C-alpha cells in the first residue's frame, strides 16, 4: 500500500482549449493525459491512494468537468482531490455535496481529512502573494502591489482557518501523524516561512506536499527539501514529468 501525489493536471476533455492556448504550445504538456494514465497504470495498485493536488480541470462548471472527473475516476486506487485556484466547479462551501455525488469514486478534501494507515491526510488550497513586484534596473525588488498584497492576506487568513479545521478534525479522532497538502506553495516568492510552514511545524506534519508552480521558471518559488523537521515536496505534473511522486 502506497501514497502518491500529483497536481495541476489541467485536463480539458470537456472544455477544449482555444487555439493558441499556452498549454497547447508547450511541449512539456504534449499528450500529458496519456503520460499520467500510463504512469498511474504502471505504479498504482487498487490498494494505493493518489492525492490530486488541485487544478484538475479547465472546465468552468461541473458539466464541463465531468469528462475530466471520469478520467480521474479511471485511474487505479483511491483518489483524493484538493481544490486548486482553477477548480471553478468546486465551491468550498459545497464540498459535502461533491462527496455525496461521487461517493465511493472520488474524495474531496476540504474542512475534513482522510486516513491513510495511521496518518491523517489534511489540506486546503492555501494562497500566495504573486505580485506584481516592481524591479529596478539591477533586478532588485523595490516594491510591490500593496492592494493585491492586502487581498492576499485576507485569503491566506481564511485558508489557514480551513486548514486548522482539517487538522483539528483529525486530531479529535485521535490522529497525531499528518501529511499536509496545499495547492499553492507554502510560502510567497520572497518568503522562506509563512503561516502555512508554521502550522505544519505546530502540528508536526511530516511532509508538506504542494503544486501550482508549473513551468520551469516557477519550480523554485518556495521551500523544497527539509526545513525545521518538515519535508517539502513540489508535485506539479510537469515538474514530475507526469509521474506521481511517492509520498509514503
Ligand atoms: Fe495550475
Ligand atoms: Fe494553481
Image (cartoon, rainbow, N blue to C red):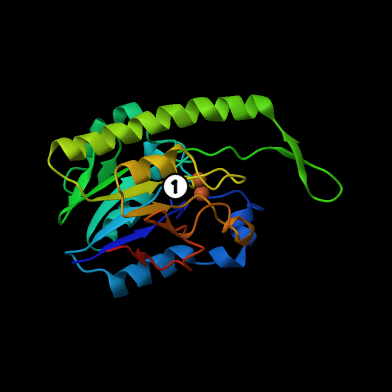
**Residue 66 shows up from this direction:** no
Which quarter of the rendered picture does the N terminus lie within? bottom left
Give residue 66's position: percent from left, percent from top. Answer: 35, 45
Query: Which residue corresponds to the image point at 48% horizontal and 28% vertical from the top-left?
Result: 155
Asked whether 208 or 204 is in front, the reply is 204
Check mark 1 vs ligand 1: CB closer than 8 Å? yes or no.
no
Residue denoted by label 1: 57
Q: Secondary structure at mark 1?
A: loop
Above-or-below relation of 77 to 105: below
Number of numbered tags placed on the structure image: 1
Query: Which residue corresponds to the image point at 40% horizontal and 36% vertical from the top-left?
Result: 89
Task: Answer with the quarter of the image where residue 2 lies.
Answer: bottom left
Residue reaching furthest to the bottom: 42
**Residue 203 shows up from this direction:** yes
Residue reaching furthest to the front: 228
Residue reaching furthest to the left: 174
Neighbour tally class for label 1: few under 14, some 14-19, many 20 plus, Cα within 10 Å: many
Give residue 161's position: percent from left, percent from top. Answer: 36, 29
Above-or-below relation of 234 to 110: below
Give residue 9's position: percent from left, percent from top. Answer: 45, 55
Task: Answer with the quarter of the image where residue 149 lies.
Answer: top right
Asked whether 147 or 177 is in front, the reply is 177
Give residue 5's position: percent from left, percent from top. Answer: 35, 59
Query: Which residue corresponds to the image point at 15% horizontal and 35% vertical from the top-left?
Result: 172
Query: Which residue corresponds to the image point at 26% horizontal and 38% vertical from the top-left?
Result: 167
Q: Is residue 160 left or right of residue 166?
A: right
Q: Is residue 192 left or right of residue 171?
A: right
Asked whether 135 or 124 is in front, the reply is 135
Task: Answer with the quarter of the image where residue 217 lies.
Answer: bottom right
Which quarter of the rendered picture does the C terminus lie within? bottom left
Amino acid at each position: 500500500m502506497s501514497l502518491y501525489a500529483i497536481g495541476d493536471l489541467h485536463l480539458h476533455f470537456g472544455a477544449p482549449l482555444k487555439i493558441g492556448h499556452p498549454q497547447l504550445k508547450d511541449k512539456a504538456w504534449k499528450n500529458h493525459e496519456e503520460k499520467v494514465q500510463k504512469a498511474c497504470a504502471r505504479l498504482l495498485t487498487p490498494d494505493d491512494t493518489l492525492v490530486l493536488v488541485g487544478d484538475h480541470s479547465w472546465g468552468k462548471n461541473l458539466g464541463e468537468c465531468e469528462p475530466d472527473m471520469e478520467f480521474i475516476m479511471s485511474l487505479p486506487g483511491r483518489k483524493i482531490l484538493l481544490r486548486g485556484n482553477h477548480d471553478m466547479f468546486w465551491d468550498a462551501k459545497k464540498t459535502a455535496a461533491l462527496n455525496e455525488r461521487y461517493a465511493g469514486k472520488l474524495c474531496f478534501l476540504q474542512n475534513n481529512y482522510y486516513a491513510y494507515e495511521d496518518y491523517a491526510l489534511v489540506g486546503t488550497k492555501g494562497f500566495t502573494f504573486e505580485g506584481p513586484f516592481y524591479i529596478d534596473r539591477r533586478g532588485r525588488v523595490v516594491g510591490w502591489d500593496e492592494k493585491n498584497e492586502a487581498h492576499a492576506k485576507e485569503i491566506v487568513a481564511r485558508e489557514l482557518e480551513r486548514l486548522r479545521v482539517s487538522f483539528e478534525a483529525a486530531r479529535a479522532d485521535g490522529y497525531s501523524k499528518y501529511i499536509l497538502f496545499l495547492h499553492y506553495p507554502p510560502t510567497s516568492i520572497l518568503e522562506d516561512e509563512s503561516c502555512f510552514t508554521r502550522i505544519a511545524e505546530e502540528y508536526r506534519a511530516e511532509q508538506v506536499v504542494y503544486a501550482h508552480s508549473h513551468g520551469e521558471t516557477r519550480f523554485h518559488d518556495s521551500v523544497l527539501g527539509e526545513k525545521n523537521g518538515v519535508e517539502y515536496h513540489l508535485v506539479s505534473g510537469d515538474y514530475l514529468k507526469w509521474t506521481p511522486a511517492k509520498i509514503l
